[in-house]
Amino acid sequence: MLDWDHRLPSDAAVLRLYLSYTDREAGAIESALKSRDREIDSGNLYPEFDVPDYADVDASESYVAVLRPGNHEVGDLRFFSDWRKGVHQSVAREAVAAVRASPSYERSMRERSHDNLGPPVVIGWTPPCLAQSKHWAIEVWLLVDFDGHVGRAHVFMVDSKSHLVTREYFTEVQIG
């Protein structure tokens, strides 16, 4: 599904992938998208005002990426799933230990804007294609800056079998 970015003129398209594990769920996704089409059509009289988009459709797995005009690269995919946060404590502890052993973790800890940003936080499971790993990975965030509204986090992907950090990057954090 290609969606829009709620800007006039539009800056980018939003690629949304909705995946199902069963035929029944595939039918429910299709029905939800058709319902959203009708909702958008009825509210699209004045497109300069906020028109609904295709966000928040229930699926087994959802992936979202930003596509910029003139650029043929797909931006980082974001993964969403109801079961994503179900990480056993022992697996979470191993992932956090791997992150803490990383030299870049130490660097980020030294560069934090203040001492009250908390410990690394396990976000949840991440598919191998996004973690650049051989197995499903655990995503761990370390907040490095936050002013109460916006900030920045150092994101680590830890392979669930090898316990190696396979990918890391920085991302913006916002409340709401």
Image: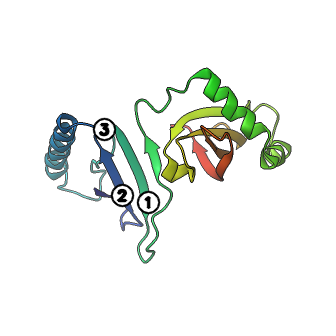
Depth check: give the residue in front, 86 or 116.
86
Q: Residue at x 78, y 31 (%)?
A: 116
Disc 1/disc 2 C-alpha distance (Å): 6 Å
Residue behind mark 2: 15
Is label 3 in a helix, a strand or a loop?
Answer: loop
- Which callout, 3 or 2, points at the residue further toward the start of the chain? 2
Amino acid found under the numbered disc labelled 1: Val
**Furthest-bottom residue in view?**
70
Amino acid found under the numbered disc labelled 3: Ala
Disc 3/disc 2 C-alpha distance (Å): 15 Å
Q: Residue at x 62, y 28 (%)?
A: 91
Picture quadrant where residue 66 is located: bottom left
Disc 1/disc 3 C-alpha distance (Å): 19 Å
Amino acid found under the numbered disc labelled 2: Leu
Q: Residue at x 70, y 40 (%)?
A: 143
Percent position of residue 71, x then y:
45, 75
Picture layout, residue 176 above or below residue 18:
above
- Which callout, 1 or 3, points at the residue further toward the start of the chain? 3
Camera-near label (3 vs 2) is: 3
Quarter of the figure with the N terminus: bottom left
- The circle on residue 66 is 1
Circles 1, 2 touching at the beta carbon (< 8 Å): yes
Percent position of residue 77, x then y:
47, 54
In this image, 32 relative to 1: left or right?
left
Residue behind mark 3: 59
- Which callout, 1 or 2, points at the residue further toward the start of the chain? 2
Camera-near label (1 vs 3) is: 3
Depth check: give the residue in front, 150 or 69.
69
**Furthest-top residue in view?**
89
